Image (cartoon, rainbow, N blue to C red):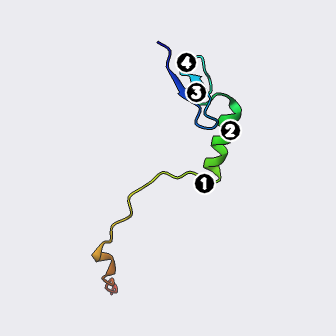
């Protein structure tokens, strides 16, 4: 059975195989469009918000 996936950029069905040098994209053009979107920060990887550390609020003692 041949596995097909949607190109993340244009949505065209693409055969997922080692012969497709651009997988999961359908072409170099779509691959470059996606790379450009990452470079322009249109995409971001979600992260957990940093937790407050109560020790950060304690002023440091001066060194003698």
Marks 3 and 4, the one that precedes in the sequence? 4
First of labels 3, 1 by sequence position = 3
Q: Could you tell whether 59 is left or right of 19 in the image?
A: left
For label 4, the SS is loop
Q: Earlier in the sequence, mark 2 or mark 4?
A: 4
Residue at position x 34%, y 86% from top? 62
| Mark sitting on residue 4 | none
Q: Alpha-carbon neighbours of circle 2 within 10 Å: few (<14), some, or many (≥20)?
A: few
How far from the left and from the top, in percent, is residue 32?
68, 38
Question: Do the residues under discs 3 and 1 have CB atoms within 8 angstroms?
Answer: no
Tell me how far mark 2 sits from mark 4, CA to CA: 19 Å
Q: Earlier in the sequence, mark 2 or mark 1?
A: 2
Q: Quadrant of the C terminus?
A: bottom left
Q: Quadrant of residue 20?
A: top right
CB atoms at circles 2 and 4 under 8 Å apart?
no
Q: Which residue is mark 4?
A: 18
- Left or right for 58, reference 32: left
Q: What label sits on residue 41 in the rendered view?
A: 1
Res 23 label: 3
At horizontal 64% and vertical 50% (from top left) the residue drawn is 39
Q: Which mark is residue 32?
A: 2
Could you give the CA–CA distance between mark 2 and mark 3, rounded to whole angstroms? 12 Å
Please tell me whether mark 3 sits on a helix, a strand or a loop. loop
Q: Position of residue 40 (x, y in %)?
A: 65, 53
């Amino acid at each position: 059975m041949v596995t097909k996936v949607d190109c993340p950029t244009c949505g065209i069905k693409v055969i997922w195989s080692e012969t497709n040098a651009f997988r999961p994209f359908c072409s170099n053009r779509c691959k470059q469009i996606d790379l450009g979107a990452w470079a322009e920060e249109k995409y971001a990887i979600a992260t957990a918000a940093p937790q407050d550390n109560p020790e950060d609020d304690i002023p440091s003692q001066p060194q003698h």
